[in-house]
Amino acid sequence: MKAPHLVVGVTSAQTCLVFTGWLRSLREAGFRVTLISSPGELLGRTAAAEGVDHRAVSMQRRIAPLSDLVSLFRLWRVLRGLQPDLVEFSTPKAGLLGALAARLCGVPVRVYLLRGLKLESASGLKRRVLLAAERLAAACVHAVVCNSESLRAQALDLRIAPAAKLHVLGDGSSRGVDADRFSPGATPVRKQFGILPGAPVVGFVGRLTRDKGVRELVDAFASILDAAPGAHLLLVGWFDESEDALDARLRARILQHPRIHYTGLVSDTAPYYRAMDVLVLPTWREGFPNVVLEAGASGLPVVTTLATGSRDAVLPEVTGLLIPPGYPEALRDALLRLLRDPALCRRMGAAARKWIMEHYAGERVAGLTAAFYQELLLGASRRRRASGPAGE
């Protein structure tokens, strides 16, 4: 029997980092997989590592009507050539253009993977445009998979799609976590940055942008140093050139600070978690943050916010602490509480790894996803049979 052809698409090649191990799992579950993103080294590298095919289609992350029309045409042409049985597009621009192109091509099963809502940090006309785009993407697909319960609730409240079209698989997460790769252990990272073995390290992993709360984190860290002068801040990520990019002054402040360590883009983050005492994600919006799962699997407590998506990734007072977004003082207090109590850090880290292995192991999430997609394919097959010659 021929393997169903699944096309997975995202806007930026950098986003391909989230597919490490994931595309291989889908391939091993019986799908023939093709990965689509804008051109970039990570597209080809990820596809080769995962054993899947790939296609490059340029897409702008910002609102760019003329460029978007060109990208839509190119996506349509690629999909018409591939003739997939199922598509899964995610991230705002690829989600919209991919869903439209797939519908124009008549792809039998179309899925929009909702990883978060960019509109949550927008206002005015931009927010209305982003909301309209989300609704249009959802209207072009058969299912919208939300990667957390709070994200599904928000999508329903915003009328992005009817309840019957909005799904959460298992306990959420778009791909789960590899608990073998992300695990406690030794690491050379502290030595690499000249951090002494006993020095407290606060870590951050991800894009360095305003929406990730990086400004609040840098402000909070300045206060933390007053109480814990030996502390370090390890920023594992890159200055993303997005609409919520950090200004030049804040970038310089980060790069010039003797206790803030900036790594740039890192393809394998596992050793960096092992150098941390606590992970912090002071985000304003999420879908379901993979970095929280990775940190927890690495035995770390997490401080994150009550924002959509991020609040689903922590058991409050068990695996970490939740604070309101946008408050450096609350961030400072939560981090100092953990840094001053190593026993509490160890308890929360151990509880986090246990909880994540039970609910978010990559094999479990991949199995739920594969089963859901097979169910959608079966439903499409039944609809085709029902609308055969007698129903045409």
Image: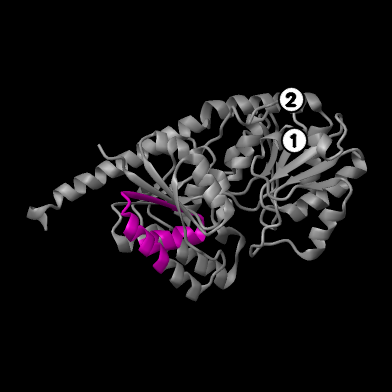
What secondary structure prevails in the magenta region?
Answer: helix
User: From the viewer's perspective, is residue 73 above or below residue 215?
Assistant: below
- Mark 1–mark 2 distance (CA, rounded to whole Å): 10 Å
Answer above or below: position of 20 versus 247: above
Numbered label tally: 2
Q: Residues within 10 Å of mark 1 (few under 14, many from 20)?
A: many
Q: Which stretch did the figure color magenta?
A: 73-101
Can you tell which quarter of the image residue 125 is in? bottom right
Q: Is residue 173 visible?
A: no
The 10 Å Cα crowd at callout 2, few under 14, some 14 to 19, many 20 or more, is some
Residue matched to label 2: 346
Quadrant in which the C terminus is drawn: bottom left
- Residue 89 location (% of width, % of height): 44, 53
The residue depicted at 31 percent of the width and 49 percent of the height is 85
**Farthest-out residue, left:** 390
Residue 43 at x, y = what percent? 53, 51
Q: Identity of the amino acid at label 2?
A: Arg
Q: Position of residue 267 (x, y in %)?
A: 64, 44
Relative depth, front residue between 54 and 344: 54
The answer to which of marks 1 and 2 sits earlier in the sequence is 1
Q: Horizontally, is 101 left or right of 234 in the view?
A: left
For the point 67% across and 24% down, the residue is 350
Locate the N terminus and report the quarter of the image it occupies.
Answer: top left
Cβ atoms under marks 1 and 2 closer than 8 Å: no
